């Protein structure tokens, strides 16, 4: 799916990341709760995502899955509970700081930078790992030039992996739906994350695209060395991909386990289909 | 909060040579000096005083429009108090240079060098005078003070969004205006300055009577050197990771945060940089012959003039804002004289040239075939060109034809068209907005049209003109 040089480049970045003390970097969530007024959106949410894990988060509509993502990424501040990435607590950090700590996400309703080109979308996300800053931008320091060149290389490599390189000059808004979803993943990976949160990556995709997506997600985990947590409604995708699944209903975790157990769990069946 | 270790993953990147870096730092300054010197020494002696005054106005307007583009265009905030920074910069700069002149030289009269003065200096003038050094220092100080105020206003208010921020900035402009109204009278002699309490001296800027005593140094040299620097800084900002971060805030603030962009940081910086250049523009304006700074220069009328330029040019386009600043400053002046069908051609033809290059903006986006790899989504239709362009042309044509025929008919039926110039101008704006709401250039630059793409490709292979 990609040229050897591209993969080498990305693998080298993955190694750089690993060298940053990212080993043993698990995402650990303990007893996180959040309510909006009287509505208890999420209660006592817990999760343990080991390094390199590929876990799923499912539940009926309105169960609080996306709220969980928003809590993890700092869009909402949890009322109580503990979120740590490796040794570091993420509670109370602003979303950009959480992204810097190594947690990247995609959005359920795609949130690309529509007017910017595909390439610029990815380059922007690379920005996080640069050090030249504002004076470097204005005075065009040599360091900035070097970093810009590195960003360009990396962005092109990422687009290559996601088969978007041919369309890099187009406005992100003008891409077809499936391409926009892939671009969101590429953009999230450009921030060089340790943990990747995917919010309904298969939504709106046709069966062929879904099939490709499964291959892609597995490959992303290998090449980039990230652990992945995904929200997904398509049970085919979830049961096939995920090692463990957490099921939410009305903001509470009702089941947690490997796919074959989850499929048989009476509580899960009840949540999805109702009681007989 | 992120540590440096979090960030630097590009440490393999190799730095280029020091000479190249020094050159990148130096050439904008050299270019600014060259353009300024050329304007003052070669253009100015060959044109009338009236166009010189117009050119100075246009230069100041370009600085204001481009600086506001950084806030309203790049980061997508809606600041409507930009004139506040203009006034702060103008008054601070004027006060510093005027009272320093009195204290050091004993008089507030300018000491013109070869490059200063709207209508040139006496032939015997030296190249550079001590007065000009004071002026330069005052300009920078005025800009810095405006920037500091930008920080003071921006820090608490940039957490707000849209309308709320607009109200705060509007309030800021009005506060500046009212504060300036309350200032004491200008001290005109050295004796008066020495008699007044030391703290009161720099604040004596005339209140509602205006502040016209500022030494009149501003010339085409000063204005256009500053314009060139402003344009280069704004463009470098836009085409850098910082600029991308700012643009991403405008596109989607939540996604920008999620991608690690500290939105508050960039919004505040955009505000500060914009305030700095507005302050410099204010300083230049204050030192212009025939201008008497007044509290109204901080009012929202002035702010709206700048916003019109930015919106017309296309929010986020530096070249668009520049063109709009030229047109918006020049057009009402042009309408002042009613006899000028020919003059409409002067405006219309360049606009058409711009229009044609715009026409090509969409042309380069043809989707190339992606081959037949399995699973690749088939290429859907990509807009070949900007569809609103025909409407833009029609709008533009209508404006030119209507204005032209008005200019032709009105004198023959005894109407003095120049009485109605502001109405005509407003109508032109309305038609423009209906025909092309995204402004002249949208977020892109003039040279990003397909017309110029081959040239850009030639000089920067592999970058495709948008990198």
Image (spheres, coloured by chain):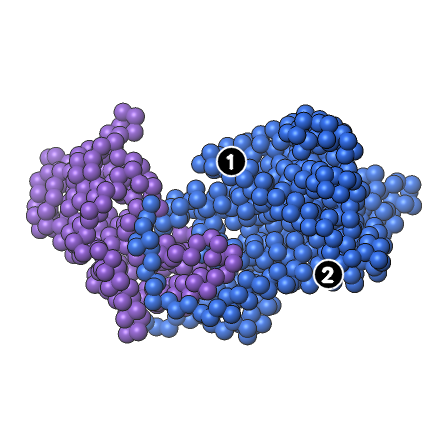
Chain colours: A purple, B blue
Left or right? Give the position of A44 relative to B32.
left
Q: Which mark is residue B152?
A: 1
Q: Residue at x 30, y 69 (%)?
A: A9
| Residue B320 in the image, given as x and y percentages of width and height | 62, 54
Q: Residue at x 39, y 56 (%)?
A: A131
| Residue B63 in the image, given as x and y percentages of width and height | 64, 49
Chain containing the residue with disc 1? B
Left or right? Give the position of A155 relative to B214.
left
| Residue B106 in the image, given as x and y percentages of width and height | 77, 40
Residue A58 sits above or below residue B45 on the image: above
Q: Give the quarter of the image for residue A8.
A: bottom left
Q: Earlier in the sequence, mark 1 or mark 2?
A: 2
Q: Is residue A175 visible?
A: no
Q: Which residue is mark 2?
A: B37
| Residue A137 in the image, given as x and y percentages of width and height | 48, 57
Q: Around disc 1, counting alpha carbons within 10 Å, would you say few (fewer than 14), some (14 to 19), or many (20 or more)?
A: few
| Circle 1 SS class | helix
Residue B68 sits above or below residue A17 on the image: above
Q: Residue at x 61, y 53 (%)?
A: B230
Does label 2 lie on the same chain as label 1? yes
Q: Is residue B176 visible?
A: yes
Chain containing the residue with disc 2? B
Quadrant occupied by the N terminus of chain B? top left
């Amino acid at each position: 799916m990609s040229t050897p040089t591209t993969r080498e480049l990305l693998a080298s970045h993955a190694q750089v990341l690993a060298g940053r003390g990212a080993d043993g970097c698990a995402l650990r969530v303990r007893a996180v709760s959040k309510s909006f007024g009287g509505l208890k959106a999420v209660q006592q949410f817990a999760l343990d995502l080991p390094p390199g894990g590929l876990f799923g988060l499912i539940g009926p509509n309105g169960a609080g899955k996306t709220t969980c993502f928003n809590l993890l990424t700092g869009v909402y501040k949890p009322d109580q509970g503990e979120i740590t990435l490796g040794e570091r607590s993420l509670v109370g950090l602003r979303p950009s700081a959480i992204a810097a700590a190594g947690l990247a996400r995609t959005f359920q309703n795609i949130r690309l930078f529509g007017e910017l080109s595909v390439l610029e979308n990815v380059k922007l996300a690379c920005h996080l790992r640069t050090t030249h800053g504002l004076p470097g931008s204005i005075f065009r320091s040599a360091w900035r030039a070097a970093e810009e060149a590195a960003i360009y290389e990396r962005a092109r490599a990422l687009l290559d992996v996601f088969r978007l390189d041919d369309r890099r000059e187009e406005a992100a808004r003008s891409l077809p739906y499936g391409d926009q979803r892939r671009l969101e993943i590429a953009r999230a990976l450009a921030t060089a994350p340790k943990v990747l949160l995917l919010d309904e990556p298969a939504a709106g995709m046709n069966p062929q695209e879904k099939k490709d997506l499964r291959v892609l997600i597995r490959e992303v985990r290998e090449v980039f060395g990230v652990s992945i947590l995904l929200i997904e409604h398509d049970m085919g995708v979830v049961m096939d991909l995920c090692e463990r699944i957490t099921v939410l209903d009305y903001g509470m975790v009702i089941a947690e386990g490997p796919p074959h157990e989850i499929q048989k769990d009476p509580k899960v069946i009840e949540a999805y289909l109702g009681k007989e | 909060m992120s540590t440096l270790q979090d960030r630097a993953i590009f440490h393999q990147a190799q730095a280029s040579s020091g000479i190249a870096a020094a050159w990148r730092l130096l050439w904008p300054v050299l270019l600014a000096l060259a353009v300024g010197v050329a304007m003052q020494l070669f253009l100015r002696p060959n044109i009338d005083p009236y166009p010189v005054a117009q050119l100075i106005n246009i230069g100041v307007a370009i600085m204001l429009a481009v600086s506001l583009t950084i806030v309203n265009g790049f980061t997508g905030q809606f600041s409507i108090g930009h004139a506040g920074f203009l006034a702060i910069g103008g008054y601070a700069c004027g006060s510093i240079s005027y009272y320093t002149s009195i204290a050091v030289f004993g008089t507030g009269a300018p000491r013109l060098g070869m490059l200063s003065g709207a209508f040139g200096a006496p032939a015997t003038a030296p190249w550079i005078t001590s007065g000009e050094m004071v002026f330069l220092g005052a300009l920078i100080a005025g800009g810095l003070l405006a920037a500091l105020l930008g920080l003071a206003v921006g820090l608490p208010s940039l957490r707000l969004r849209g309308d709320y921020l607009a109200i705060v900035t509007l309030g800021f402009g009005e506060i500046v205006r009212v504060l300036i109204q309350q200032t004491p009278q200008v001290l005109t002699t050295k004796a008066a300055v020495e008699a007044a309490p030391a703290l009161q001296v720099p604040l004596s800027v005339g209140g509602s009577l205006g502040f016209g005593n500022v030494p009149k140094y501003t010339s085409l040299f000063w204005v256009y050197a500053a314009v060139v620097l402003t344009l280069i800084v704004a463009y470098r900002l836009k085409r850098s990771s910082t600029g991308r971060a700012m643009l991403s805030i405008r596109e989607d603030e939540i996604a920008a945060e999620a991608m690690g962009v500290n939105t508050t940081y960039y919004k505040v910086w955009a505000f500060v940089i914009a305030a700095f250049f507005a302050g410099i523009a204010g300083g230049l304006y204050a030192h212009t012959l025939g201008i008497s700074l007044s509290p109204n220069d901080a009012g929202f009328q002035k702010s709206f003039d700048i916003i019109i330029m930015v919106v017309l040019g296309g929010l986020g386009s530096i070249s668009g804002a520049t063109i709009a600043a030229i047109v918006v400053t020049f057009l009402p002046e042009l309408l002042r004289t009613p006899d000028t069908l020919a003059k409409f051609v002067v405006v219309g033809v360049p606009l058409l040239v711009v229009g044609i290059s715009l026409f090509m903006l969409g042309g380069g986006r043809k989707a190339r075939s992606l081959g037949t790899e399995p699973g690749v989504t088939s290429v859907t239709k990509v807009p070949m060109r900007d569809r609103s362009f025909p409407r833009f042309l029609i709008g533009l044509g209508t404006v030119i034809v209507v204005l032209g025929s008005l200019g032709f008919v009105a004198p023959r039926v005894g109407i003095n068209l120049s009485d109605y110039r502001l109405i005509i101008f407003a109508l032109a704006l309305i038609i423009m907005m209906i025909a092309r709401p995204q402004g002249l250039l949208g977020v892109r630059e003039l040279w990003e049209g397909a017309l110029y793409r081959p040239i850009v490709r030639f000089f920067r292979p592999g970058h495709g003109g948008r990198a």
